[in-house]
């Protein structure tokens, strides 16, 4: 079962959507947590990684920090590779030197998008975008340094504080509140995933010392239109969102049409399947907007 020595965990990207949930859930689990935001660990400064990790001496590092701007990565592939792949290799080597396991957060967007059932760990990645290529190279960097490391590929994340600029649910709620007609792509599919549910599984996977690749996403498949409709209807039942072709939203990166994930590995570690995405969305909205119902 779990690694008996797991007591201290460092989290990179600690102020980000997933990183902040990992910090909170690791603390609740009773582990000492060192939250590393950009000020404490800058992914551009590889040379600092050994000193930082030697100073902390963690048992595990959950590596959530990344260049997550998909269109920027498309325009600047060398940058994407440096931050998402090379920095991951450098971090994994520094972690290995201090005997720490690395959990690298991978992406659902690394497949070719041609499937119509969720991608499993046994499916072959074939990245279409520079972001996906850099994230997939990051996986290889992480697992090459130590096969005992873990890669958790996550779905389309939502959650976080409603005051956060990038909060997807809050942005759609505000858009709906304007009363204007809403449109969303009906030809892009994925697995909407509450960052808290993902962090919960990441903590459980650490507890059982899981290694290799594991898909971490709420279950079910949603088009962008389904997803946005479900969000706005939790606030305004019956509100419609018109489905449009994704060419309506021009972007630099040729993102795949289909990015849904499922895991065929949770059983190995005695971990149950993840809840349905609509259930996760309801739980998130209930938690984040409690005061609206008062
Ligand atoms: N969001 C999704 O739907 C999704 C889907 C698939 C995979 N993922 C992966 O999940 C992980 C977490 O994503 P997220 O949604 O939580 O993203 P996020 O909220 O944007 O957080 C990313 C964090 O990385 C930090 N960061 C960026 N560049 C950095 C640098 N050069 N040095 C140090 N820190 C840096 C950011 O710090 P600042 O706050 O200072 O900018 C931010 O806190 C990432 O690995 C991402 O690739 C996300």
Image (cartoon, rainbow, N blue to C red):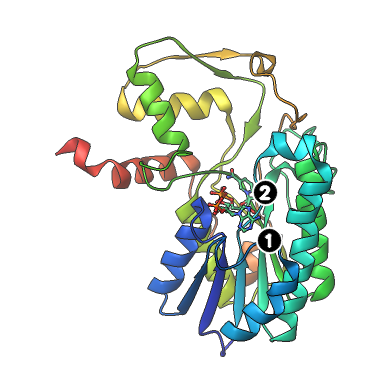
What residue did someone put label 1 on? Answer: 43
Q: Is residue 191 left or right of residue 278?
A: right
Q: Is residue 127 above or below residue 215?
A: above
For image coordinates 36% across by 25% down, the residue present is 174
User: 201 or 102: nearer the eye?
Assistant: 102
Disc 2 packing (10 Å; few <14; some 14–19; many ≥20): some
Find residue 164 and name its label.
none
Residue 198 % position (x, y): 53, 56
For image coordinates 79% across by 76% down, the residue present is 146
Disc 1 packing (10 Å; few <14; some 14–19; many ≥20): many
Disc 2 within 8 angstroms of ligand 1 (CB): yes
For image coordinates 64% across by 18% down, the residue present is 249
Disc 1 within 8 angstroms of ligand 1 (CB): yes
Q: Quadrant of residue 247?
A: top right
The single residue placed furthest to the left in the displayed view is 294
What residue did someone put label 2 on? Answer: 67
Marks 2 and 1 in Cβ contact (< 8 Å): yes
Q: Secondary structure at mark 2?
A: loop
Q: Is residue 162 above or below residue 235?
A: below
């Amino acid at each position: 079962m779990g690694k008996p020595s797991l007591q201290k965990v460092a989290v990179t990207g600690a102020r980000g959507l997933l990183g902040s949930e990992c910090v909170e859930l690791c603390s609740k689990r009773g582990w000492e947590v060192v939250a590393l935001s950009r000020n404490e660990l800058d992914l551009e400064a590889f040379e600092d990684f050994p000193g930082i990790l030697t100073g902390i001496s963690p048992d595990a590092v959950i590596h959530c920090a990344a260049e997550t701007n998909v269109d920027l990565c498309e325009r600047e592939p060398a940058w994407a590779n440096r931050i998402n792949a090379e920095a991951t290799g450098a971090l994994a080597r520094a972690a290995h030197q201090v005997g720490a396991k690395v959990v690298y957060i991978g992406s659902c967007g690394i497949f070719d998008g041609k499937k119509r059932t969720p991608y499993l760990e046994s499916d072959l990645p074939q990245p279409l975008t520079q972001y996906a290529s850099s994230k997939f190279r990051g996986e290889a960097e992480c697992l090459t340094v130590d096969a005992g490391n873990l890669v958790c590929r996550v779905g389309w994340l939502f959650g976080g504080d409603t005051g956060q600029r990038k909060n997807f649910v809050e942005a759609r709620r505000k858009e709906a509140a304007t009363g204007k007609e809403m449109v969303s792509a009906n030809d892009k599919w994925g697995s909407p995933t509450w960052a808290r549910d993902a962090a919960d599984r990441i903590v459980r996977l650490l507890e059982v010392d899981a290694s290799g690749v594991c898909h971490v996403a709420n279950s079910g498949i949603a088009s962008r239109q389904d997803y946005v409709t479900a969000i706005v209807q939790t606030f305004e039942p019956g509100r419609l969102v018109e489905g449009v072709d994704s060419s309506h939203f021009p972007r630099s990166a040729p993102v795949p049409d289909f990015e849904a994930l499922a895991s065929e590995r949770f059983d190995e570690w005695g971990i149950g399947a993840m809840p349905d995405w609509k259930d996760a969305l309801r739980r998130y909205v209930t938690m984040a907007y409690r005061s609206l119902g008062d």
